[in-house]
Image (tube, rainbow, N blue to C red):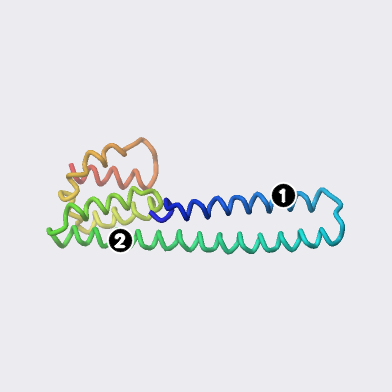
Amino acid sequence: ARRRKEEYQHASRILERREHDFARIEETLKSSSLATREKKDLQRHRALLEKVMRERQEREDKLNDDMKQWSVTAMRYYAKTLATSTKHDLRAAFRLVAIWTDGHILTEGSAIILEELKSGLPTRKLLPLAYQLASRLAQEESPFHDALTKLVIAIA
């Protein structure tokens, strides 16, 4: 959800502009014979842009890692909720599948689904999602499709 916000998109556009500026500076430094003062100014500006871009990339990587960790933890707890409770079945089932199919943790999510199937995930609680899950089936070879096939077979 955070990546869809206007501020995040604006920051991404700024980063793209900085990358473009960095490439232009690199090109200018390589191709032209500038005065020593101008060259030093461009080199300083390039170093500053490089630092800002590196810090931004580090923050982006940390955000991605945090999102993955949150998603994995949430999937585990939604699966445990389905296994131990009947109070929040529908919401837990929908959230479990939504997080798994969101796209950023397909491999890890598939491993969690297979692990939970082995430990007794009540697949009957996923029956309302059978059509949506079956519609994602494909002839591809990936951990996601393997787990999805096993889950749909278990539901059936």
Q: Residue at x 20, y 46 (%)?
A: 154
Amino acid at pointer 1: Arg
Q: Amino acid at mark 2?
A: Ala
- Give the x, y percent position of residue 30: 80, 51
Apparent side of residue 137 relative to residue 23 in the rendered image (left or right)? left
In the rendered view of the protein, which quadrant contains the C terminus? top left
Q: Nearer the viewer, residue 28 or 124?
A: 28
Real-space Cα distance between discs 1 and 2? 44 Å
Q: Residues within 10 Å of mark 1 (few under 14, many from 20)?
A: few
Q: Secondary structure at mark 1?
A: helix
Q: Nearer the viewer, residue 82 or 10?
A: 10
How packed mark 2 is, by other alpha carbons closer than 10 Å (few <14, some 14-19, many 20 or more), is some
Residue picked out by circle 1: 24
| In this view, the mark in front (1 or 2) | 1
Task: Indicate the secondary structure of the residue bearing disc 2.
Answer: helix
Counting from the top left corner in percent of width and height, residue 84 is at 16, 62
Left or right, 18 with respect to 108, comes to right
Residue at 50%, 59% in the rendered image: 60
Q: Give the labeled residue for mark 2.
A: 74
Residue at left offset 27%, top offset 54%: 96
Q: Earlier in the sequence, mark 1 or mark 2?
A: 1
Quadrant in the rendering for residue 108: bottom left
- In the rendering, which numbered label is found on residue 101? none
> Which residue is nearer to you in this view: 79 or 71?
71
Give the side of residue 152 with respect to residue 124, left or right.
right
* Residue 49 locus on image (x, y percent): 66, 60
Question: Which quarter of the rendered picture does the N terminus lie within?
Answer: bottom left
- Residue at horizontal 18 percent and vertical 44 percent from the top: 128
Q: Is 126 on the left or on the right of 97, as rendered? A: left
